[in-house]
Image: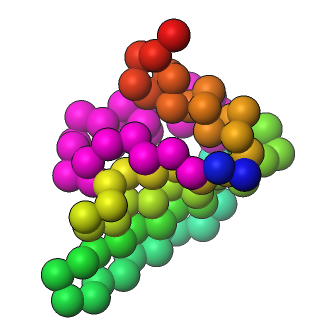
Amino acid sequence: MTTQILGDEFDEALRLKLGEVLRQSGARMNEPAAHALGGSQESVSMVFDLDGEVLTVMSETYIGLSIHGPEDLVLKIRRAVLDEP
């Protein structure tokens, strides 16, 4: 398992691109997004199923937009979102 920070949590274009890549990959959200607020920090967690694997997408103040799951799948999603070779 690995976690990759994709960029800033407030980058709307990045969020949209991640959503597009997940949809095109066939990912399905397992449960409604979980929101938490503590002082000046906010976090949103979304859990997806993709090819029988679990991916967790987190948006956290001061940390960024991240994806967590099996390394090969996380890196594949990262490359697609960030247009990396």
User: Residue placed at 27% from the left, 88% from the top?
Assistant: 38
Q: Is residue 74 left or right of residue 42?
A: right
Q: On the image, which quarter does residue 41 sit in?
A: bottom left
| Number of marks in the rendered image | 0
Residue projecting furthest to the bottom: 39
Residue projecting furthest to the left: 40
Residue 32 visible? The answer is yes
Up-down: is 40 above or below 31?
A: below
Up-down: is 8 above or below 14?
A: below
Q: Is residue 51 left or right of residue 59?
A: right
Residue 29 visible? The answer is no
Residue projecting furthest to the top: 85
Q: List x then y, in percent, for residue 14.
A: 30, 36
Up-down: is 1 above or below 21?
A: below
Q: List x then y, in percent, for residue 16.
A: 32, 37
The colour scheme used here is: rainbow
Q: On the image, which quarter does residue 47 sit in?
A: bottom right
User: Residue placed at 24% from the left, 34% from the top?
Assistant: 13
Q: List x then y, in percent, for residue 4.
A: 51, 45
**Does residue 10 belong to the magenta stretch?**
yes
Q: Is residue 59 left or right of residue 53?
A: left
Q: Nearer the viewer, residue 56 or 48?
A: 56
The residues colored magenta run: 3-27
Q: Is residue 55 left or right of residue 36?
A: right
**Does residue 14 belong to the magenta stretch?**
yes
Up-down: is 24 above or below 60?
A: above
Q: List x then y, in percent, for residue 36.
A: 36, 81
